[in-house]
Amino acid sequence: MAKFEESMYQLVVETSTKLPKDVRRAVKAAKEKENAGTRAAMSLATITNNIKMADEQVSPICQDTGLPTFKIKTPVGVNQIELKAAIKNAIVRATKDGKLRPNAVDSLTGKNSGDNLGDGVPVIKFEQWEKDYIDVRLILKGGGCENKNIQYSLPCELEGLGRAGRDLDGIRKCILHSVYQAQGQGCSAGFIGVGIGGDRSSGYDLAKEQLFRPLEDVNPNEDLRKLEEYILENANKLGIGTMGFGGEATLLGCKIGVMHRIPASFYVSVAYNCWAFRRMGVSVNAETGEIIEWAYQDGEFIDFAEENEAAQETAAARSEDVIKLQAPITEEQIRSLKVGDVVVINGMMYTGRDAIHKYLTDHDSPVDLNGQIIYHCGPVMLKDENDVWHVKAAGPTTSIREEPYQGDIMKKFGIRAVIGKGGMGPKTLAALQEHGGVYLNAIGGAAQYYADCIKSVEGVDLMQFGIPEAMWHLRVEGFRAVVTMDSHGNSLHADVDKSSLEKLAQFKERVF
């Protein structure tokens, strides 16, 4: 068991810090197809740079290491209770070492366990088979993309597409709609696993199971093979693009599975995964616990470190096109910004996610936030032997969760800028216009890129909410983001949503 535990630790670290070969190839292909000089091209350059940095530093690709989900096949006679205990030990160690963010939160009390263990966490699903080795697959699926999972009950009416019936064409409409509704909030360009049939829970299990398939495999079901190819081609015509900025790459992979159902129910379940598609697998010797072979090793390995750094700079990101901001920021500076501007931030920013926003609604802020910047971020943090905190990963979280609070919080405390990903809604947009504020979209998943911009941790408040939800005081240099909602009532997110809905409508007519 000691060796099996070590093997599981290696699997967790590899999954968190290094993208599989097939995912790398998909990201590279998307980057090569993107139009130079666009916001999407700049985003993809940041993404590939982040992948390279995670490789070199053996640090989490994305700060949201999600809910670890293991699917394990064991020979008859293997003690699954002992395997589960070893996996839990490996999870605790990986969390302590900063390879996983502590993500296990008690749903009733809100208390973070601090070690990624809790009721039902991690998810470990066993299956017996007649082979003589253990097959372990792990996926780390963050909350941003997990929240964009969606399930349809056919027949139904779909915005832009009309009625979806209980047939292959109705399934097609549901899958296209699932990509549309994700927009940039799931860190597009993404991947989807689709489960057809089952009940509400088994349908989602089947959908997530599809994410374990290699991207370049061929579906043995001819109808599903054609549907996968159709979706992958046409979803990219929606123009949502990387991070929802618009562009050529919206979907990088589509895998579909089917199972039987009862007559009264017809579910189409979609598991959306971000570009940081972290899934790995190993074959393990059932007697020694040693790794025999790693999965997803076919084909070329793309080492983004070998790419020409100069080629990663696009017209949208050159220094002469960048606006520098130093907190505290004045209302005049904010109102001079417009959608599409690229900004670079130096100085202080303060993290705030769900717990902080709820707290600030009813309490005073522990720091003066007038003219300051709130960063929607739940970082991975480690404390050294001198009790000094260091940032190990610090990309943005999905901002739409804060929509009920954000505008009121900005006006209450004088906050001038909010950084996150995926954009926010009409309530926040109205507050930005009234108050003189701006929303800045950072590149989702680029946790190493942004961690490198954080030069020191100046303090922390409200640690009772746990590391991801605490208010961290961060001093940054060269922190780059894009203005996607300005103080003049403009929202790139609303514009892309509208244009992609119009494009979605062209797929209304029957195809299958």
Image (tube, rainbow, N blue to C red):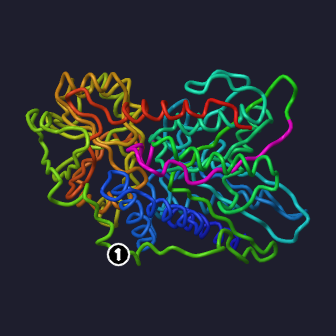
Is 362 rendered above or below residue 171? above
- Residue 373, given in percent of the width and then of the height, sits at 22, 41
Range of the magenta residues? Answer: 240-260
Q: Is residue 327 left or right of residue 289?
A: left
Which residue sits at x=81%, y=72%? 286
Which residue sits at x=42%, y=43%? 244
The picture quadrant where one finds residue 311 is bottom left
Q: Is residue 424 magenta?
A: no
* Picture mark count: 1
Q: Is residue 252 magenta?
A: yes
- Residue 436, given in percent of the width and then of the height, sits at 16, 28
- State the residue in front, 415 or 124: 415
- Residue 88, given in percent of the width and then of the height, sits at 64, 57
- Quarter of the N terminus within the rendering: bottom right
Is 273 rendered above or below residue 265? below
Please give the residue where the numbered disc 1 appears in the rendered image. Answer: 308
Which residue sits at x=79%, y=36%? 197
- Residue 95, given in percent of the width and then of the height, sits at 51, 58
- State the residue in front, 21 or 73: 21
- Quarter of the C terminus within the rendering: top right
Q: Is residue 49 left or right of residue 249?
A: left
Q: Is residue 383 left or right of residue 279?
A: left
